[in-house]
Image (spheres, rainbow, N blue to C red):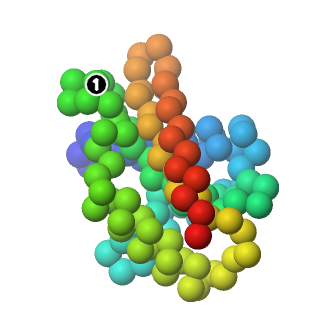
Amino acid sequence: MATHNDTGKTGEALAIEFFRERDYLILHTNWRWRHLEIDLIATKGNYLHFIEVKTRTSERFGKPEANVSRKKLRNLQDAAAAYLHTYPSKKRIQFDVLSILSTPQGPQYTLIEDHYVW
């Protein structure tokens, strides 16, 4: 497996731990619809969170969250619409990005909460 795949898998495991420690209930990991994927789907309070996780081992090519493009966010919204069609919910919807910089000193997290509510 390529190094970037290992980094991604490690990042997603760290993300699950990050959110569970903050009392989120993880509903799905790597939820797929057609060619689209949502890294994490979780609930907390009255919100349903669709979460993109970006992990890097250095900032040589920029911060991890810089790699979340408009197209990626559009794909996340499209996948979320498919998810809501399959699993209707009365919760408010929020799109989040968790950026993880994995360093020898330990992971550094940046949570970007979008608060985009449908």
Q: Quadrant of the C terminus?
A: bottom right
Task: Say which residue appears at 49% left-offset and 25% top-offset.
Answer: 107
| Residue 108 position in % (x across, y down) | 49, 25
- Report the amino acid beneath label 1: Glu
> Residue 85 versus residue 31: which sits nearer the camera?
85
> Residue 82 versus residue 93: which sits nearer the camera?
93
Q: Is residue 89 above or below residue 103?
A: below
Secondary element under disc 1, as helix, strand or loop, is: loop
Q: Circle 1: is it few (<14), some (14-19), or many (20+) Cα within 10 Å?
A: few
| Residue 36 position in % (x across, y down) | 36, 71
Residue bearing the label numbered 1: 59
Regarding residue 39, the answer to whether it shows in the image is yes
Task: Say which residue appears at 71% left-offset and 38% top-offset.
Answer: 21
Outermost residue, top direction? 105
Is 95 positioned to the left or the right of 34 in the image?
Answer: right
Q: Is residue 90 above or below residue 24?
A: below
